[in-house]
Image: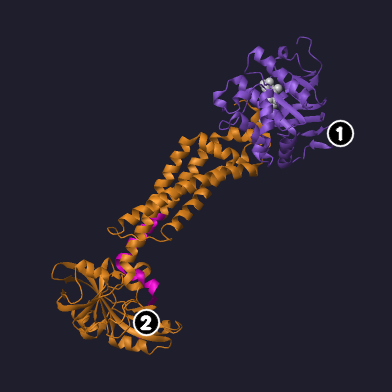
């Protein structure tokens, strides 16, 4: 990169401008990626933390519009006792437990907050890892750390959830949220009294939202779905059944993807102009004996330098911002929100630049003889 | 090594027809000497230089160095021609055609980098060349801070720094006044003799050519006798 590095220094104004644009776009991409993941976890961590692998839904006739792709939704699902009992007998299913999910208002002595109540049978093993020996019991609830924060509550405090008065048995040191509300766990009997969504004619004492399945093989699931009248999805698929999650996550991801595309286009446009403006130099270099390969390597190396510096600074700044804002904004930081977008930006940026730089192959060394 | 053009013809496509810019030219420039190539505008001087330097392949005929086999023929590929230019030919263009971001010294070191050597390995030789063209004190200046004559001197030093067998020069004085022009021609012919290069030098202006060893006249792409009027 004998010429490329010197061009960087010589035309530093132009390259600084380009690098600044890359810094800003990278900053946006990385910050949005962190926000996307943070908001996503804020909607799904209660479900992903379930120690099960599949959930069986029903699709109610009066259900709200179904999820993307016509899949089931948590709000539209209601399973009956007979269904989870039937699921327990299916081959390859080691555990089938009812799980009730309802968003309710909870009031502590100090404040009121929206929470999601997960209703589970005592001893069902549906509490997340990290719950230890704690378990639910009638009249006693367990709080996730988020729920404890939101309610300002600790073990022994009295709460009213919906129409029910309960006592906090313990605060679990686990993060669990569902559709942007923190999770608390109640017994299934208590949950049924909270006023779950009920299909007409259902007996409120025999329902839950989904059946949580632990399976050793999923061969028999489809057939069992037909017999029992449910739709089974693995935990990952079931995230799109959280109605707020799928649309929110989709639009944020779309923004990230668009920004990455814009970055590649901007870099491509810059190098198109730059390559055209130096085509006279390129003709001279070719006349002096520079091979096209040498010139391509030189120019792409230059694009790589700018991209790595711009993306590096942008990523670093965004990472610092997310670290500082972590306690106030739902951001999540990880390799998938920093290194991955950075690498994608560099790779696509170089690809955009390479398309522009390829014009070098068409420059005729004969042009060096013409007066500039 | 001598520069030998053997029955060189160059035909450009010109719309539906063609234009013969160089027409069956045979010419030998002996090693260590300078031949000036004269002729009116459009007579094909630059085109002949382009063929001699492998910038474009001849339509027929060939170019050879010394007694060796032809280096440029109708079938020579771009890559091969590029390598021949890099290893064996020096160019001086009408405009200095320096790279704006490089200092005078770096313009010369660049050639070593193109040849896959460390640029600093030729620093001494490059500084010598800059001294030889009288630009030692300007070694670390960029083209935008040099005068037109100084730039052309840097371009001449660049052409000689790689020890070329053949030097091809296209109207080096057209942007300079008469005195500066004479100096530049003397510099080129002197260095060509000193480094034993066969130099073919295109010029409009016969009055600056006191120092050259031979002249050739081109008219409509053909070598002719010296016209009586010139
Ligand atoms: N790349 C090209 N494509 C087509 N025709 C060309 C090209 N270059 C030159 N010509 C034509 O070939 C003829 C010879 O041009 P050339 O540049 O060799 O002349 P020249 O003797 O160098 O003239 P000048 O003294 O004005 O530089 C001219 O008629 C010109 O129009
Ligand atoms: Mg010409």
The answer to which image quadrant residue A83 occupies is: bottom left
Q: Does A87 lie within the magenta span?
A: no
Q: Which chain is orange?
A: A
| B122 to A126, vertically: above or below | above
Front-most of residues A140 and A53? A140
> Which residue range is magenta in the image?
A228-256
Front-most of residues B134 and B75? B134
Front-most of residues A85 and A331? A331
The answer to which image quadrant residue A172 occupies is: bottom left
> Badge 2 sits on which subunit?
A
x, y (%) of residue B81?
73, 38
> Badge 1 sits on which subunit?
B
Q: Secondary structure at mark 2?
A: strand
Residue B67 - label: 1
Residue A307 - label: none
Q: Could you tell me which residue is drawn at 51 percent across and 41 percent down?
A: A271
Q: Does A240 lie within the magenta span?
A: yes
**Is residue A116 at least partly visible in the picture?**
yes
Residue furthest out toward the top: B229
x, y (%) of residue A211?
33, 81
Residue marked by disc 2: A213
**Magenta part, dominant SS:** helix
The answer to which image quadrant residue B196 occupies is: top right
Q: Are marks 2 and 1 on the same chain?
A: no
Question: Rounded to the nearest whole Å, what is the CA distance between mark 2 and mark 1?
Answer: 88 Å
Q: Colour of chain B?
A: purple
* In this picture, residue B145 sits left or right of residue A127: right
């Amino acid at each position: 990169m004998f010429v490329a590095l010197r061009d960087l220094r010589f035309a530093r104004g132009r390259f600084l401008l380009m690098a600044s644009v890359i810094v800003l776009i990278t900053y946006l991409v990385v910050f949005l990626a962190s926000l996307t993941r943070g908001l996503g976890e804020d909607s799904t961590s209660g479900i992903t933390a379930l120690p099960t692998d599949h959930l069986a839904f029903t699709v109610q006739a009066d259900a709200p519009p179904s999820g993307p792709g016509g899949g089931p939704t948590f709000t539209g699902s209601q399973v009956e006792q007979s269904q989870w009992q039937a699921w327990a007998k299916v081959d390859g299913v080691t555990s089938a437990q009812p799980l009730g999910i309802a968003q309710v208002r909870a009031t502590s002595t100090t404040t009121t907050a929206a929470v999601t109540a997960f209703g589970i049978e005592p001893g069902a093993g549906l509490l997340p890892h990290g719950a230890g020996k704690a378990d639910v019991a009638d009249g006693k609830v367990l709080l996730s750390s988020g729920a404890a924060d939101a309610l300002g509550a600790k073990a022994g405090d009295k709460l009213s959830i919906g129409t029910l008065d309960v006592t906090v048995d313990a605060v679990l040191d686990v993060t669990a949220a569902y559709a942007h509300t923190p999770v608390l766990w109640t017994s299934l009997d208590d949950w049924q009294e909270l006023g779950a969504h009920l299909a007409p004619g259902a007996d409120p004492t025999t329902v839950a939202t989904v059946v949580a399945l632990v399976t050793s093989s999923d061969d028999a699931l489809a057939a069992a779905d037909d017999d029992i009248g449910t739709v089974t999805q693995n935990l990952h698929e079931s995230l799109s059944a959280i109605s707020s999650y799928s649309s929110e996550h989709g639009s944020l991801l779309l923004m990230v993807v668009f920004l990455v595309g814009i970055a590649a286009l901007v870099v491509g446009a810059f190098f198109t102009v730059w390559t055209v403006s130096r085509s006279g130099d390129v003709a001279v270099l070719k006349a002096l004996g520079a091979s096209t390969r040498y010139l391509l390597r030189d120019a792409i190396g230059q694009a790589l330098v700018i991209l790595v510096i711009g993306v590096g600074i942008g990523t670093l700044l965004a990472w610092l911002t997310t670290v500082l804002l972590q306690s106030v904004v739902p951001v999540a930081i990880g390799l998938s929100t920093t290194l991955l977008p950075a690498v994608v930006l560099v790779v696509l940026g170089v690809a955009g630049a390479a398309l522009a730089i390829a014009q070098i192959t068409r420059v005729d060394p004969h042009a060096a003889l013409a007066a500039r | 090594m001598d520069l030998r053009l053997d029955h060189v013809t160059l035909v450009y496509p010109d719309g539906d027809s063609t234009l013969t810019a160089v027409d069956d030219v045979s010419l030998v420039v002996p090693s260590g000497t300078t031949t000036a190539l004269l002729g009116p505008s459009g007579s094909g001087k630059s085109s002949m230089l382009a063929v001699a330097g492998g910038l474009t392949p001849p339509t027929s005929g060939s170019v050879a160095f010394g007694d060796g086999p032809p280096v440029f023929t109708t079938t020579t590929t771009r890559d091969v021609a590029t390598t021949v230019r890099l290893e064996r030919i020096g160019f001086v263009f009408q405009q200095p055609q320096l790279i704006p971001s490089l200092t005078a010294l770096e313009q010369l070191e660049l050639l070593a980098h193109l040849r896959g050597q460390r640029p600093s390995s030729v620093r001494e030789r490059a500084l010598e060349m800059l001294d030889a063209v009288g630009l030692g004190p300007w070694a670390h200046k960029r083209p935008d801070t040099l005068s037109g004559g100084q730039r052309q001197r840097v371009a001449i030093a660049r052409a000689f720094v790689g020890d070329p067998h053949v030097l091809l020069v296209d109207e080096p004085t057209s942007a300079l006044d008469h005195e500066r022009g004479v100096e530049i021609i003397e510099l080129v012919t002197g260095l060509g003799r000193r480094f034993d290069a066969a130099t073919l030098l295109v010029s409009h202006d016969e009055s600056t050519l006191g120092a050259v060893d031979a002249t050739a006249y081109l008219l409509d792409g053909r070598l002719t006798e010296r016209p009586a009027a010139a």
